[in-house]
Amino acid sequence: MEERRADELKERPLGELLRELSQETATLVRQEIALARAELAQTGKKAGIGAGMFGGAGAAGLMALGSLTACFILALNAAMPAWLAALIVALVYGAIAAVLALRGRDRIQEATPPAPQTIETVKEDAQWVKNPTRSAGR
């Protein structure tokens, strides 16, 4: 059977064979794109479920932090008035937040500018555009 198919192909004109090859290639590409689209949709659905679970974990973590805060306040309440215990816990949380904010700001400042060499070459390009007869150092 394969031998008969080869004989049929030999008898057909080259232009017809190339047209058929082009059509089959286009069909193959469309099928591969459809497969990739289906796989991405399935992966996206799984990622969406995972993101929802992270959101739920964040909400549960926030509730746990609230309960822990109440625990700290009640523990300190044994030795002092409740308002003072709550104030102390709030100040401790505020100090933690301030330290994290300052460290985060420092890390961001260390990271900027993100691409110093690129910025320099863009400045050189801008200088060259202003004065194209003279190179800006390249």
Image: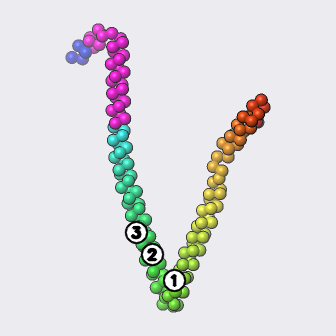
- Counting other residues with Cα less than 10 Å from the Cα at mark 3, is it few (<14), some (14-19), or many (20 or more)? few
Magenta-highlighted residues:
6-34
* Residue in the picture at 59% in, 66% down: 101
Question: Label 2 belongs to which residue?
Answer: 66
Q: Does residue 117 appear in this view? A: no
Question: Label 3 belongs to which residue?
Answer: 60
Q: Are marks 2 and 3 in contact (CB under 8 Å)?
A: no
Question: Label 1 belongs to which residue?
Answer: 86
Q: In the rendered image of this protein, does residue 23 appear above or below residue 84?
A: above
Q: In the rendered image of this protein, does residue 26 appear above or below residue 19?
A: below
* Residue in the picture at 33% in, 37% down: 35
Callout 3, which amino acid? Ala
* Residue in the picture at 33% in, 19% down: 20
- Frontmost residue, 106 versus 128: 128
* Labels in figure, total: 3
Callout 2, which amino acid? Gly
Q: CA distance from mark 3 to mark 1?
A: 22 Å
Instruction: Decide whether residue 7 is among the magenta residues.
Output: yes
Quadrant containing the C terminus is top right
Callout 1, which amino acid? Ala
